[in-house]
Amino acid sequence: MTLDELREKIDRLDDTLLKLYNERMELVHQVGELKNTTGAPIYRPEREQAILNRLKAQNDGKLTDEAIDALFLEMFAVARNLELPEAVAFLGPEASFTHQAAESKFGALSTYLPISSIPGVFREVAKGTAKFGVVPIENSSNGIVTDTINCLDEYDLKIIAEVVMDIHLCFATICEDIKKITKIYSKDIAFGQCRKFLQDLGLDEIEQIPVESTAKAAKLAAQDKHAAALCPSIAAKMYNLPILFENVEDDMNNRTRFFVISNFENAPSGDDKTSMLVRLANKPGALVDFLNDFEKAKVNLTKIKSHIVGGQSVFFLEFNGHKDDKDIAEILAKHKDEIKVLGSYVKERDDI
């Protein structure tokens, strides 16, 4: 087959795809009209995951699972925005890792609101300025994000999804001679995450200037010919900052997990995780007694972390399953005065 013949076949397939996309959008529109009569949310993560799982199970072509996710998640986002454009608040600024996590769930067409603090994200979602919020909950190197735990305790919002992202940093500068760099901008924790790289290249003695975000670091470095930034590659590209070295973090397995929050709850998907906060009586054996109920029900606890919230000790717990599963619902009912369920949501394949 000649190149022209192959291109003609591709063009015919594209024409067919366009018709099929429009047919799908018409059906989505009808679903949206039905949802509007009941007040049901447009975004249903468990339904989207079920579609993806079904497609991957029958796939026998060249598309990888990751490619199927990328193609169909973007299509889902387009459909949602055609039906009911809803704003997504995230811990800003633009080009931050939280922004990337938000786009991975809501696509390029959504309306994004960069918010300067985690409490600010919760506040705007609670007020209705944004339908969804995206905030970090933990990093594989730095642990749980206390501000997110505090806000989950304070606000009556639910976790409806999680995103786990690999965190990669680059070293970017407009300076053509690395020996002439006199300062490096980045977020404070990024300097520690790239300590070995800075030492290996003799950059550890250069002035390190902490700023609010790695995205801002890229913006500042782009304005100073003797400065550099430790930042995400997307931030460097946004500010036309040349990347000198990629993946300069010490830990190649550095990951951050994010929560998507909103004002509704998910139905069970069959592959869920639940997060909750637990306040137990201050007496010997209280935690053991509580955990024994999960063991008896054969519920797999995946995380337990203690925190101080409002001067009081609380536990952040997670387990596999949905809060409405029969065995779990019985445990939650027994301890209803001690538990705040933060949300049940589709479990990511890779956790940290």
Image: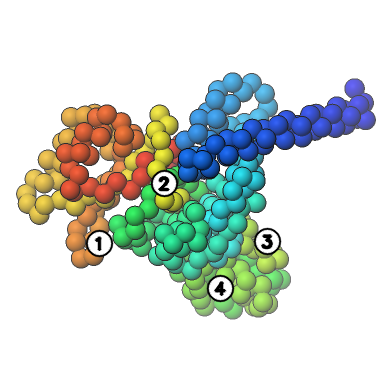
Viewer-nearest of discs 3 and 4: 3
Q: Which of marks 2 and 4 precedes in the sequence?
A: 4
Circles 3 and 4: CB atoms closer than 8 Å: no
Observer able to see residue 192 = no
What residue is rendered at 47% in x and 40% in y? 38
Q: Position of residue 243 (x, y in %)?
A: 66, 62
Asked which secondary structure carries label 3, the reply is: helix
What residue is rendered at 57% in x and 39% in y? 32
Q: Position of residue 154 (x, y in %)?
A: 31, 60
Quadrant in the picture for residue 352? top left
Viewer-nearest of discs 4 and 2: 2
User: Residue lying farthest left?
Assistant: 284
The residue carrying mark 3 is 237
User: In the figure, is residue 295 to the left or right of 30?
Assistant: left
The residue carrying mark 2 is 264
Q: CA distance from mark 1 to mark 4?
A: 35 Å
Quadrant in the picture for residue 18? top right
